[in-house]
Amino acid sequence: MAGSLTFAMLKPDAVGGGKSGAILAHIQQAGFAIRAMQMLRLTVTEAEAFYAVHRERPFYGELVEFMSSGPVVALALEAPDAVAAWRTAIGATDPAEAADGTIRKLFAESKGRNAVHGSDSDENAAREIAFFFPERELALLGVV
Ligand code: IDP
Ligand code: MG
């Protein structure tokens, strides 16, 4: 594999806003290989589980409601140092603070409705990829 993996997701604001194609093009132009991809809608229970690490935060309820409000696109991305490279490509959590040219600066609406997710460590990338993609599919795709 030419690099490592990270987990990315296009959030309901991006998918519902018709921005999926533009963001996917941006991802590929930035040098990430899309190794797995699925459009789906998270149930409330699934969104709660995915963001369980944030359950004590004041925005948890709002986050779960938003993330289960419409379709998302789940992605396994490959690049050299993928986790760090993807965090750089997406920019700060709040688009008002995101650097020029980052995906959140270009496509996000607000700190909550911020277009894309990115794993924060290799360990969480593996956990998040496994949350969305069955081992068998990853094996058939040659990802693992
Ligand atoms: P990250 O997505 O940049 O890693 P985290 O702190 O892990 O940011 O927060 C997870 C997600 O929770 C954010 O992407 C955003 O959608 C939402 N979120 C974070 N902080 C706030 C907030 O202050 N208000 C509303 N939503 C927030
Ligand atoms: Mg995070």
Image (cartoon, rainbow, N blue to C red):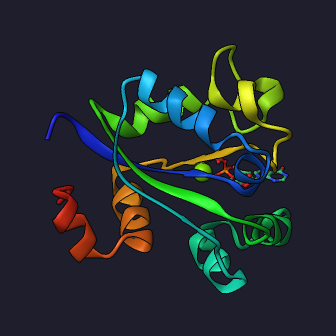
Query: Furthest-top residue in view?
Result: 100
Residue at 44% in and 22% down: 30
Q: Position of 7 compared to 111: left or right?
A: left
Query: Furthest-bottom residue in view?
Result: 45
Q: Position of residue 27 (x, y in %)?
A: 48, 31
Question: In which quadrant is the C terminus drawn?
Answer: bottom left
Residue at 73% in and 57% down: 12
- Quadrant hosting residue 94: top right
Q: Position of 68 compared to 117: left or right?
A: right
Q: Would you place residue 104 above or below residue 137 in this image?
A: above
Q: Would you place residue 125 above or below residue 111 in this image?
A: below
Q: Position of 57 compared to 71: left or right?
A: right
Q: Position of residue 89 (x, y in %)?
A: 53, 27
Foreground residue among 139 and 121: 139
Q: Position of 115 compared to 22: left or right?
A: right
Residue at 43% in and 73% down: 131
Count of number-bearing discs: 0
Foreground residue among 137 and 62: 137
